[in-house]
Image (cartoon, rainbow, N blue to C red):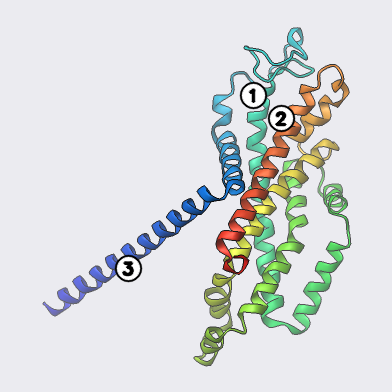
């Protein structure tokens, strides 16, 4: 009987804890939505990013034409009722290719930012928490990466790995590692001197437990902001590499490659180049505006 009562007590406590967590999550979401409605630039960024995510996830199912279908009889047509954004030099529907390219850019941005986040968290945490020669070796390696211009570093990675979407993800991911590592290291150095961390050390908790549960958990705001900005940077890097012919290869519809393919017709059919270029601009702008908004919302020190 007593055992059953204990089990019921544990179950009730679990339900209360789950309800508290749910209430906290709902409160955070409500506060964020309230903040977004008061911050015009952050709201614009959220709308642009949301539209990009929708286009990247379901856009290929909404495309009015096959993005690879060639129709030379309709080449370089301006925007019309049939082709809302016109056609390119091979008569392919630009709207369909923009929607298809959004999926490629979304994949590149998310996977490259995830790669930067994973490597940056590991390197920055080790350098900031353990210090000493760990810090010296890691940060000098980061300084070496920073000494290369970003696009040149990406081209070096492509030269080693070869062109293609996977190489672009690798190049853009490595490109974002130095900034992420420095942000994580700075936060670890700041938080590890706090009293609650010293109390955990005095209680004999392991370094890994302290690092993950107490330090990294309190470093999330700037890390989230940096990750958001890295997604936009990765998309821009991927577009630049594809423009140079080193990224996603034809016939795949990647926005940077579309800009490159249409530049020969910029006088006679400027929409072929301007529309995918505008898509890149709006997506990167959206992530930058959203990142700035998240920084102001998550970091009270910016108030």
User: Up-down: is 240 above or below 273?
Assistant: below
Residue placed most toward the observer, 283 or 2? 283
User: Up-down: is 213 above or below 162?
Assistant: below
Identify the mark at residue 253; answer none if there is no mark: 2
Disc 2: CA contacts within 10 A as few (<14), some (14-19) or many (>=20): many
Q: Position of residue 280 (x, y in %)?
A: 72, 37
Q: Given the current orientation, which residue lies at the most extreme left position?
A: 1
In front: mark 1 or mark 2? 1
Instruction: Residue under label 3, please give it.
Output: 17
Residue 250 at least partly seen: no
Q: Quadrant of residue 4?
A: bottom left
Q: CA distance from mark 1 to mark 3?
A: 48 Å
- Quadrant containing the N terminus in the rendered view: bottom left
User: Up-down: is 116 above or below 1?
Assistant: above
User: Up-down: is 66 above or below 160?
Assistant: above
The disc, 3 or 2, on the residue closer to the chain's N-terminal end is 3
Q: CA distance from mark 1 to mark 2?
A: 9 Å
Q: CA distance from mark 3 to mark 2?
A: 48 Å
Helix, strand or loop status at disc 2: loop
Q: Residue at x 59, y 49 (%)?
A: 42
Q: Position of residue 20 (x, y in %)?
A: 34, 65
Residue placed most toward the observer, 27 or 2? 27
Identify the mark at residue 96; answer none if there is no mark: 1
Q: Check contact, mark 1 vs mark 2: CB within 8 A.
A: yes
Helix, strand or loop status at disc 1: helix
Q: Position of residue 16 (x, y in %)?
A: 28, 67
């Amino acid at each position: 009987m007593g055992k059953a009562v204990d089990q019921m007590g544990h179950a009730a406590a679990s339900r209360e804890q789950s309800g508290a967590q749910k209430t906290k999550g709902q409160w955070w979401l409500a506060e964020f939505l309230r903040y977004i409605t008061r911050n015009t630039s952050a709201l614009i960024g959220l709308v642009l990013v949301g539209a990009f995510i929708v286009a990247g996830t379901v856009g290929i199912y909404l495309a009015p034409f096959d993005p690879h279908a060639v129709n030379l009889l309709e080449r370089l047509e301006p925007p019309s009722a049939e082709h809302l954004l016109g056609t390119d030099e091979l008569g392919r529907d630009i709207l369909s290719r923009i929607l298809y390219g959004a999926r490629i850019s979304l994949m590149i941005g998310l996977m490259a930012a995830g790669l930067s986040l994973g490597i940056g968290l590991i390197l920055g945490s080790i350098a900031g928490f353990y210090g000493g020669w760990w810090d010296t070796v890691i940060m000098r390696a980061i300084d070496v990466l920073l000494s290369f211009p970003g696009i040149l570093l990406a081209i070096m990675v492509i030269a080693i790995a070869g062109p293609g979407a996977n190489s672009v993800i690798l190049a853009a991911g490595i490109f974002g590692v130095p900034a992420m590592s420095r942000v994580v290291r700075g936060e670890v150095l700041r938080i590890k001197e706090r009293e609650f961390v010293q109390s955990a050390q005095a209680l004999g908790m392991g370094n890994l437990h302290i690092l993950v549960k107490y330090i990294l958990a309190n470093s999330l705001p700037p890390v989230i902001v940096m990750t958001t900005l890295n997604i936009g940077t990765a998309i821009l890097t991927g577009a630049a590499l594809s423009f140079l012919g080193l990224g996603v290869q034809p016939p795949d519809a990647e926005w940077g490659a579309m800009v490159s393919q249409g530049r020969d017709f910029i006088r006679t059919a400027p929409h072929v180049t301007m529309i995918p270029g505008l898509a890149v601009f709006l997506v990167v702008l959206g992530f930058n505006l959203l990142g700035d908004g998240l920084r102001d919302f998550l970091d009270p020190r910016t108030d």
